[in-house]
Structures are given as structure tokens and as C-alpha cells.
């Protein structure tokens, strides 16, 4: 079964069971765990992927079964309202439980799924350990005047508001308008663009006619018969928890209150939350589900140890961005300086590949829970094209991985006391701590080398609106919960910050950053004046006294393979212009050196633990537009050509701003680099360049450590 690098978890089992001629596609995660949690389908307007923010976390602790309800996803789409009654969905749940070998399970549902779960619990009580119902949209005797003024099958006199919830409107061209209206109502919270976008996309995987059938079946019209729910509620004997947002604009929380009352269940209200809380408040929902499952089927007793305060060592949990290797190099240097200030400090690293490669070479301690993290570099590589990575959209589409990885972090800090957590561009931790401020029980330092999501020009108004929204949310989080970050450290100087604003009506980025960050200066992790052995290194590479070395490297991810091949194509032309040039290609830890063809004058190696030493031994470099390598070359005062990834806002805007300030490097667009003659000419010209860069700080790691040391 193939691994999907953009999902938070991969299924252990995939299958299809057929019931009365309708195919039901299911997946099983965490096959070896117990008990089983069934994430029940909801209205067919979305498939089981709706639960993507829950599957990764829950399947680390429990066996999880999901399936696409009839009418959605990979499941069948029978015709007619009678095929979509509550009773049909109830028996589908049982059929999937049978097909997956699930004798008993906790049923977790949202919206319509709450009704179907009640049916199962009432009709098959021995199969259900408990019901966890989120925002139930049950057919209970709770009035909703705003919706009830419009008839489902009436001919419309208006298309405003809930009048859009009408089969004629859907079938006669208004479906897209309804879908956008519905999900705006489902996610009334500010800054919910990604959740709405996901759901709108899923809604267009189902036809308006099929959705109309599913709705008529649930309402008991067009030939379908609806079974009253209240009598079934009275038959539910298992534990029940109902969770409902007080700002639910799909179904009032009065319905949730009624369901809890009729089943004897507990009620949890989420103040200010809407209907789609699994996607909008995933951390809280995941915690509540886990608490409920552990209550209905307690885990085995565990041994715990509490350490008296005076016996606790100073402990730091360090998180270093896994997208490339640059953060790992600087963070290891900062950690070394931190130990110089606090020799007794213990540092654990919650890290992913390729960061773990750097840390293990340095003898650092990798926290065992790192094995549970979903690899962010894998997702980034999956998102990339021919030297093309839309970095903002790629990170935006990494949402389920970020939720999953935050939940790993949350488990770690719940089980172990840390004095300080350092997050070097640990986007998941910073964001979800601001969304769940009650979880902070340690000092937290945030580090970054850029501030501000910026749109690429060809993204137009739509992309600009999204980056503005992301920036506005961050600014609002910082204003409301300033206590979350005990220190915000910008790795650089104020002049390195782009001269732009966060978006219309928002502050200038440089002004806001100066008001909200401390500045460490740049962190290279080495002092160029103290480097030794470069001549020996050149000799070991076979570089003669009359030869020059051009080093070609593309960082620590696998995104740079196309650039390596483009440079290889240009090597014969370069050597015609500059016969003295020899080339060393460094593929890094995620590209196989053997994947590159043999070329005269070229040596190829994989990962080099101290790449800066080879950069120091070179006469010229060709690199991507990543900050770490370009700033190392700047500090070493080496000429270089850099070719930013297309659509990578950080490389094209933030990094270029900084390099322009230093007067460093020759920027070459990839469109130009695709022409071997143009690339060869740029390399040949750059090797003769006399550099006059501004000097790069050599005390950045020490300054950053000073800022962190104060917190422990």
C-alpha cells in the first residue's frame, strides 16, 4: 500500500464492502491498537477525508475505522431518496464494522452522523461502547425558524439565506452558490479559509442530484420514510457525550442539549465555535475524543514518576524546522552556546529527517517520540514541480500534518516537564499554542528568519487575500495572547526584513517585527576566520593548483534534483569558457547521488555533515535560493549564482531582500537557467567576480543563546 506524504497517517487496510448493491469504501488505521473508534460518515456533501485532522492522532492510540458514506467519496451512489434513509446509513455502519472485524467500537460522529449513531446504539447495543456526537443535526423536536421558513421542495421566491437549501435551486444551477453559502455558515469563525476551501472542493465531488437524494432520504420525503428519533434515544444504554459549538449556524446547540438530555449523556459546549469543530478546533476535539474513549474503555495501568522540584534538571525541548538542513545547523550551534551558559542543561530534540541526520552526527539526543512525527519534507517534495515550489500554498496544504505533529508535541510535554521549549519555525507548535493557550506550561521561545506571508505576483488577488488573512490571524493572536511567546527571536537584523506590509490595512512588516522581536543577528554556526584545513580539503578532492572548484548544492530536501540536472547539462559549456573549473555536486541526504549521470569534470557526493567547510574550499558555488547556504557563502565571501525556486515567496522575496542588502550573489531566474548557454555564461562570469559583501556577524549563535538562557 503506497504511502501518501501529504496525509497525517496511511491506512493499514483499505477495502470495499457491498451491502444491498451499494459499495462502501473503508480504511483502517492503527490496526494493532484497541479499542476501535469508528469515525462515522456525515452528510454526503463531504467524504471521510473530513476527519483528516483526527485520524493521525487517534490512530497512534486506538484502532480507527473510517468509511465514505453512501453517496460520497469512493462509495456507491444509489439513485432515489429511499436509498438514503437513516436506517440505511445505520446498517452501513454495521456492515463496515463486520467487514473490518470490529465487534465493538466507540462511534464518533458529526452532524447527520449523530442520528445514524443513535440508530446503531439503539438497534445493535452490543456493538457500541459509546457515542461521541459533535454538533448533532438530529431530527428532534427543536425548532429552527430561520431554516424552517423555507421549504425543501418549494418553488423559490427568493434565493437569499437558507432559501438556498432547496432541491430546485441545486438542480437548476444554484448548487455552487449553495455550497459556498453552506460552508460559510459551517465555519463562521474568522480565518477559516482552508476549512471552507477543503469542503467546497469535496462538495463538488458529488452531483447536485445525488445530494438532493441524500437530503430527501434524511427528511423522509420523495418516497423515503423517516423513523422518529426520540424513541430510539430512550433505548441508548451506552455512555454518551455531546459536543456542540454555541455559534453553530447549521444546527443550534439546543439540538445537542436535547440529545444529551434524551440519552442521559454529558454535554460539552464550545463557546464561540461553529459547526465544523473537527477541522476548526482539532486539538480540543482530539483531546475530548481521547478522554471519552479512555473513560469507556480505560487503558492498562501505567507506571508514572513525579520528580521533586529541587531534583529536576534544567530541561529544554528543541524543535528545528525539518524543511532543509539550515535550521539544524544554526540550532545545533545555538544549543552548544546554551550549554556553555548552563552546563547542566539537558536538551531533547523533537525532530524529523533530515534534521535528525545533522543532530545524530553531533551526538544530540533525539526524543523517542520523534518517530511519531509525520515528515514535513516529504510533503514539501510531494508539492514541488520542475524547480517549482509554491511554498505558501504547500505549507497551507500541510494542515493535517501540522495538527498531527502538534498532537505528538502535546503528548510529549504532557508526559515530561520542560523548562523551555524552543521552536525554530515550528509552525504547528506556535499556531496551536495560540489557539489553545491553556496548554502552555513551559517557557516558549519562537525563532524565525522571516516574518510575513507574501503573495507571488502571478497569484493575483486571490492569493493576496489568503496571505493577508494568514498575516492578520498571526497579528491578532500575538495581540491577544502575547504571553504564549516568552521570547520572539529574529535570526538577523532589522535591515534584513522586507520593506512591505502584511496586507491592506495591516502594519508594515519591518515596523511590526521591530516592535515584537529581539534580534540575534545571523547565525552561521562558524567563524570564517577560524576555519582551517581548506587547502588539505582541496587537495583531497584532487583540485590542482591551477584549477578552481565550483560546488553545486541544493539544500537538504529533495526539491532540488531538477536544478542539479540543469547545471549538469551546462557543465561542458562552462568548461569551454573556463577550462580550469572542476565541479563537486552535493546532493544532500534526500537525493541519491547515483541518480545523476556521470559527467566529465564532475564529482558527485551525498550528504556532507559540515558543508560550509567545502564551501570554504570552493572558488564558486551554484545553489538554490535558500537562506542558509547563500548566507554561508556570503560570510565566506565566495562568489555564487543562486536560482530561487519558482513561486517560493521566501526565496524570491525575503531571502533576496537580505542578499541584496549584503550585495551578495548573482540571482538567476530558473527560466534563464533552463538555457544551458545562459547558465554557463553566468557561472563563468561569476567565478571572476571580485566580491565586496557586507560582513556577516559571527556572534549570532551566542546572542541567540543569551536570549534563551534567560528563560531557564
Image (cartoon, helix red, strand yellow):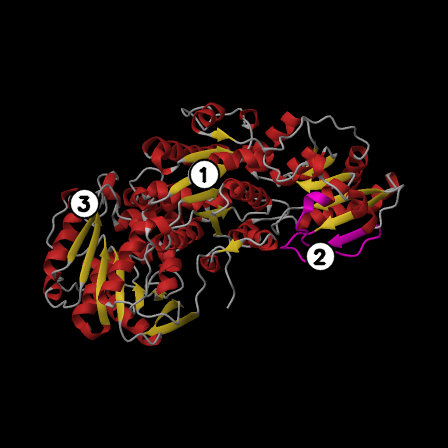
Residue under circle 1? 446
**Relative horizontal placement of residue 476, taking residue 267 as reference (left or right):** right
Give the number of the disc on residue 147: 3
The residue range painted magenta reads 587-613
Predominant secondary structure, magenta span: loop
Q: Which mark's residue is nearer the viewer, 3 or 1?
A: 1
Q: Position of residue 104 (x, y in %)?
A: 26, 73
Residue annotated with mark 2: 593
Q: How many marks do you count on the picture?
A: 3
On screen, residue 494 versus residue 416, left or right, reads right
Question: Does 568 appear in magenta?
Answer: no
Crowding near the residue tagged with mark 1, few <14, some 14–19, many ≥20 C-alpha atoms within 10 Å:
many
**Nearest to viewer (mark 2 / mark 1):** 1
Question: Which image quarter: residue 492?
Answer: top right
Q: CA distance from mark 2 to mark 3?
A: 62 Å
Q: Is residue 31 placed above or below 410 in the rendered structure?
A: below
Measured Cα–Cα span from mark 3 to mark 1: 46 Å
Q: Quadrant of the C terminus?
A: top left
Amino acid at each position: 500500500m503506497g504511502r501518501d506524504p501529504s496525509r497525517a497517517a496511511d491506512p493499514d487496510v483499505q477495502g470495499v464492502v457491498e451491502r444491498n448493491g451499494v459499495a462502501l469504501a473503508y480504511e483502517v488505521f492503527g490496526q494493532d491498537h484497541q479499542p476501535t473508534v469508528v469515525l462515522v460518515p456525515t452528510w454526503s456533501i463531504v467524504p471521510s477525508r473530513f476527519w483528516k485532522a483526527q485520524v493521525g492522532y487517534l490512530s497512534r492510540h486506538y484502532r480507527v475505522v473510517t468509511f465514505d458514506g453512501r453517496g460520497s467519496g469512493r462509495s456507491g451512489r444509489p439513485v432515489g431518496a429511499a436509498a438514503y434513509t437513516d436506517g440505511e446509513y445505520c446498517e452501513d455502519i454495521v456492515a463496515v464494522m463486520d467487514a473490518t472485524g470490529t465487534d465493538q467500537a466507540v462511534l464518533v460522529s458529526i452532524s447527520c452522523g449523530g442520528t445514524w449513531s443513535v440508530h446503531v446504539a439503539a438497534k445493535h447495543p452490543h456493538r457500541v461502547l459509546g457515542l461521541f456526537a459533535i454538533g448533532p443535526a438530529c431530527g428532534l423536536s427543536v425548532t429552527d425558524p430561520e431554516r424552517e421558513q423555507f421549504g425543501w421542495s418549494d418553488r423559490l421566491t427568493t434565493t437569499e439565506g437558507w432559501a438556498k437549501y432547496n432541491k430546485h435551486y441545486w438542480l437548476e444551477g444554484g448548487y455552487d452558490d449553495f455550497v459556498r453559502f453552506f460552508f460559510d455558515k459551517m465555519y463562521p469563525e474568522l480565518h477559516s479559509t482552508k476549512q471552507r476551501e477543503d469542503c467546497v472542493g469535496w462538495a463538488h465531488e458529488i452531483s447536485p442530484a445525488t445530494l438532493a437524494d441524500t437530503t430527501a432520504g434524511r427528511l423522509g420525503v420523495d418516497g423515503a420514510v423517516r423513523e422518529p428519533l426520540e424513541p430510539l434515544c430512550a433505548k441508548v444504554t451506552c455512555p454518551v457525550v455531546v459536543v456542540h459549538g454555541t455559534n453553530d449556524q447549521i444546527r443550534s446547540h439546543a439540538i445537542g442539549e436535547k440529545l444529551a438530555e434524551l440519552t442521559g449523556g454529558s454535554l460539552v459546549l464550545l463557546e464561540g465555535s461553529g459547526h465544523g469543530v473537527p477541522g476548526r478546533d482539532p486539538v480540543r476535539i482530539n483531546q475530548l475524543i481521547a478522554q471519552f474513549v479512555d473513560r469507556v474503555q480505560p487503558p492498562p495501568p501505567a507506571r508514572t514518576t513525579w520528580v521533586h522540584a529541587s531534583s529536576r534538571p534544567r530541561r529544554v525541548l528543541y524543535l528545528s524546522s525539518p524543511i532543509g538542513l539550515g535550521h539544524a545547523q544554526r540550532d545545533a550551534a545555538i544549543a552548544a552556546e546554551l550549554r556553555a551558559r548552563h552546563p547542566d542543561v539537558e536538551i531533547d530534540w523533537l525532530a524529523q529527517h533530515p534534521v535528525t541526520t545533522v543532530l545524530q552526527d553531533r551526538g544530540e539526543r533525539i526524543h523517542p517520540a520523534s518517530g511519531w512525527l509525520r515528515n514535513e519534507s516529504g510533503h514539501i517534495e510531494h508539492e514541488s514541480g520542475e524547480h517549482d515550489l509554491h511554498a505558501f500554498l504547500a505549507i497551507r496544504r500541510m494542515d493535517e500534518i501540522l495538527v498531527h505533529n502538534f498532537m505528538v508535541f502535546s503528548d510529549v510535554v504532557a508526559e515530561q516537564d520542560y523548562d523551555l521549549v524552543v521552536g525554530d519555525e515550528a509552525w504547528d507548535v506556535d499556531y496551536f499554542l495560540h489557539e489553545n493557550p491553556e496548554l502552555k506550561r513551559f517557557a516558549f521561545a519562537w525563532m524565525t528568519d522571516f516574518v510575513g506571508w507574501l503573495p507571488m505576483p502571478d497569484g493575483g488577488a486571490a492569493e493576496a487575500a489568503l496571505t493577508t488573512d494568514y498575516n492578520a490571524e498571526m497579528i491578532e493572536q500575538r495581540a491577544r495572547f502575547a504571553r504564549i511567546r516568552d521570547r520572539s527571536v529574529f535570526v538577523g537584523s532589522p535591515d534584513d526584513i522586507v520593506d512591505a506590509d502584511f496586507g491592506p490595512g495591516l502594519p508594515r512588516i519591518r515596523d511590526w517585527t521591530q516592535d515584537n522581536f529581539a534580534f540575534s543577528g545571523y547565525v552561521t554556526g562558524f567563524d570564517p576566520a577560524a576555519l582551517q584545513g581548506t587547502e588539505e580539503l582541496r587537495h583531497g578532492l584532487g583540485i590542482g593548483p591551477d584549477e578552481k572548484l565550483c560546488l553545486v548544492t541544493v539544500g537538504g530536501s529533495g526539491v532540488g534534483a531538477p536544478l542539479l540536472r540543469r547545471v549538469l547539462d551546462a557543465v561542458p559549456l562552462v568548461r569551454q569558457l573556463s577550462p580550469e573549473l572542476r565541479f563537486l555536486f552535493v546532493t544532500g541526504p534526500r537525493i541519491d547521488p547515483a541518480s545523476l549521470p556521470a559527467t566529465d569534470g564532475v564529482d558527485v557526493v551525498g550528504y556532507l555533515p559540515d558543508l560550509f567547510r567545502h564551501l570554504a574550499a570552493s572558488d564558486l558555488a551554484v545553489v538554490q535560493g535558500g537562506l542558509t547556504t547563500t548566507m554561508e557563502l556570503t560570510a565566506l565571501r565566495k562568489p555564487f549564482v543562486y536560482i530561487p525556486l519558482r513561486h517560493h515567496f521566501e526565496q524570491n522575496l525575503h531571502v533576496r531582500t537580505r542578499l541584496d542588502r549584503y550585495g551578495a550573489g548573482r540571482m538567476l531566474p530558473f527560466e534563464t537557467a533552463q538555457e544551458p548557454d545562459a547558465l554557463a555564461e553566468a557561472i563563468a562570469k561569476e567565478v571572476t567576480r571580485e566580491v565586496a559583501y557586507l560582513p556577516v556577524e559571527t556572534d549570532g549563535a551566542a546572542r541567540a543563546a543569551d536570549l534563551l538562557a534567560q528563560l531557564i
